[in-house]
Image (cartoon, grey):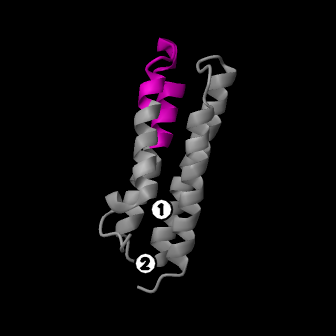
Amino acid sequence: MGKATSFKDLIVWQKAHNLVISIYKMTTLFPAEEKFGLVSQMRRAAVSVPANVAEGFVKRGIKDKCNFYNIAQGSLEELKYYLMLSKDLGYLKENDHVLSEAESIGKLLNRLWSSTLTTDY
């Protein structure tokens, strides 16, 4: 694949966007009392991942780009915790496929961050 011209060209963004959709769908099944608690936190953390990849993509400086990609990684880790908590609370019976996808996205984010450090602008 050639050089990305838009954040939408990045596989990491595509996968993170699909993860957001999955999180929104799965949290519709959570108890109503979690609407402003865990559901909100999970959705915010999930949305933060592709949003920060998109914002970092257009930043011109390496330091700025890396900062946004690092924030995306932090949000992804936060989401992974919420997924584990949701299972422990009995809101999710199975979350292995979503956690696996989050792990995959994390590896892609690491590669994006590393490649940003070695790119000439």
Q: Which of 21 and 54 lies nearest the eye of the viewer?
A: 21
Q: Is tag 1's residue or tag 2's residue first in the polypeptide sequence?
A: 2
Disc 1 designates what residue?
68
Whether residue 82 is visible here, answered yes or no, is no
**In this picture, residue 25 sits left or right of residue 117:** left
Identity, as a three-letter code, of the amino acid under mark 1 = Phe
Q: Where is residue 78, by image quadrant?
A: top right
x and y percentages locating residue 9 in the rendered image? 34, 61
Crowding near the residue tagged with mark 1, few <14, some 14–19, many ≥20 C-alpha atoms within 10 Å = many
Q: Amino acid at mark 2?
A: Gly
The Cα atoms of the two marked residues, 1 and 2, are separated by 11 Å
Image vertical order of residue 83 relative to residue 8, above or below: above
Q: Is residue 50 visible?
A: yes
Q: Is residue 39 part of the magenta span, yes or no?
A: yes
Q: Residue at x 66, y 19 (%)?
A: 89
Q: Residue at x 45, y 86 (%)?
A: 120
Which residue occupies the extreme front position in the image?
1
Image location of residue 81, percent across then percent down: 64, 37
Q: Tell me the element at label 1.
A: helix
Question: What SS does tag 2 mark?
Answer: loop
Residue 120 or 4: which is nearer the viewer?
4
Magenta region, main secondary structure = helix
The residue furthest top is 32
Segment tinted magenta in the rendering: 24-46
43 horizontally vs 3: left or right: right
In the image, is residue 66 above or below residue 33? below
**Residue 55: horizontal and vertical position, in percent?**
37, 60
Numbered circle sitting on residue 61: 2
In the rendered image of this protein, does residue 114 appear above or below residue 81? below
Given residues 95 and 44, the one toward you in this image is: 95
Q: Residue furthest bottom?
A: 120
The residue under the point 38% across, 69% down is 1
